[in-house]
Amino acid sequence: MDLLDSMKVYVMAVEKGSLSAAAAACDISATMAGNHLRTLEKRLGMRLLQRTTRRQHLTAFGEDYYVRCREILRLVAETDAQAQNLQLAPAGKLRVTAPVTFGTEALMPALPAYLARYPEVSVDVALSDRVVDLVEEGFEAAIRIGQLPDSALIARPLAPYRLMICASPEYLAHRGTPGKPDDLSRHECLSFSPAALASWRLQDEAGSLHVPVSGRLQVNSGQALRVAALHGLGIVLQPAILLEADVQAGRLVQLFPAHQLPSRPMNVVYLPDRYRSPKLRSFVDFLVERFR
């Protein structure tokens, strides 16, 4: 007899209270149910149930064996379900969230390739720079920039988020080009907020430099800061994905290319129990492939 089938009958007998009830639940005869139990007891060399004409009692070993059987059957069922999911084509709506600049400048240009590869998947993207609660707000994945706090989420690393310092040719013609990082303290520097503007950190072969900077304009939007820089309002420190096309086109000039700017770690995060979903797995694998 199949061992797993015998375990199922035994678990049903314990939970239903009798072999006859287990037989009905498993859609087999009472005789067959008894055969399964005897086969198990013979295999183990131990009694599992003490039976009388009126009721049955678990033996001490039978109690422990029941717990183990339940766990084994649960693992087998989960493994079968996982294997079945792997064979399914990704389909359905996928809800993801990402930071505004990365979502606009990098994720949106990448999505056509993903949607072409998985035509049965639709993607609902929410762009926000706040930390979104995946459970509370019903998202399946989030792209996070910066150090991750300890949490129950699974994180897959993506390529680090690089930064650039740039200014427009018009601004540099009017105010002069800073020759060394310390010169930034005499220029108009653009930033999200006064707190973010306190100092910029650069690094070269000699070590790390913290340059105090200031400016009269702060904007809570990376895209708006880019536009401000394009119109000659100052020097901007922003993600490379936002500025490098303007640098290549000559609309902005990269400053201090020989210096390294601190990059920030970037990850896609998701809940552990969601990864069995083919649509989520396909999306996470696509991001890791695209942004590595």
Image (tube, grey):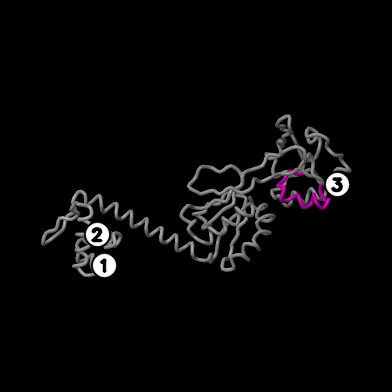
Tell me which segment is drawn in magenta: 236-252
Q: Is mark 1 on a helix, strand or loop?
A: helix
What kind of residue is marked 2? Answer: Tyr
Taking depth in this image into account, of 246 and 110 the one nearest to the observer is 110
Q: Position of residue 6 (x, y in %)?
A: 26, 61
What kind of residue is marked 3? Answer: Pro
Q: Look at 57% across and 66% down and name the residue there.
A: 121
Q: Which label number is shown at residue 10?
A: 2
Which of marks 1 and 2 precedes in the sequence?
2
Q: Position of residue 176 (x, y in %)?
A: 87, 39
Residue 265 picture quarter: top right
Q: Which label number is shown at residue 169?
A: 3
Q: Which residue lies furthest to the top in this view?
A: 206
* In the displayed structure image, the side of residue 11 where residue 180 appears, left or right: right
Which of marks 3 and 1 precedes in the sequence?
1
Disc 3 residue crowd, few under 14, some 14–19, many 20+, Cα 10 Å = some
Q: Where is residue 223 in the image (x, y as percent from the top left)?
A: 72, 52
* In the displayed structure image, the side of residue 267 where residue 177 appears, left or right: right
Which of marks 2 and 3 precedes in the sequence?
2
- Mark 2 or 1: in front is 2
Q: Which label number is shown at residue 25?
A: 1
